[in-house]
Amino acid sequence: MPLHFNFPNAQVATEMYPIEFREVAIFHYLRAIYGYDRAKIFVSAEDYEQFLAMPLEGVHRSFQDAVRRILGPDYPFARAA
């Protein structure tokens, strides 16, 4: 399977596979050491907004932009009643 179907959120991957990075279809955000935690960014509106406001770069910015483009700028999940 081509890497752009499971591209990791690791900057080194963008350097090693620049063509695949330009064609990313699915991000595999497997690491949580880059300033955002995958287990938390979709938990609440506050966490989501904080993630979208982060000044990220490289693959992390591309992931953030993809989330914003696909899910929108407002928290897309129902709030707990």
Image (spheres, rainbow, N blue to C red):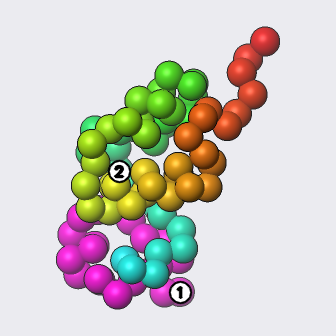
Give me the residue at 56% from left, 55% from top. 69
Q: Is residue 12 magenta?
A: yes
Q: Is residue 8 left or right of residue 6?
A: left
Which range of residues does the magenta coloring cover?
Answer: 1-20
The residue located at (71%, 21%) in the rendering is 79
In the rendered structure, which amino acid carries the disc numbered 1? Met
Using the image, determine if residue 27 lies above or below residue 78: below
Is residue 8 placed above or below 42 in the rendered structure? below
| Residue at screen point 48% across, 64% down | 27
Disc 1 to disc 2: CB gap under 8 Å: no
Residue 53: percent from left, percent from top:
37, 36
Q: Main secondary structure of the magenta part?
A: helix
Give percent across and percent down for residue 75: 61, 33
Identity of the residue drawn at 54% across and 73% down: 25
On residue 1, the disc is 1
Seen in the picture, residue 28 relative to 34 is either above or below; the reply is: below
Query: Which residue is nearer to you in this view: 27 or 70?
Result: 70
On residue 31, which mark appears? 2
- The tag on residue 64 is none
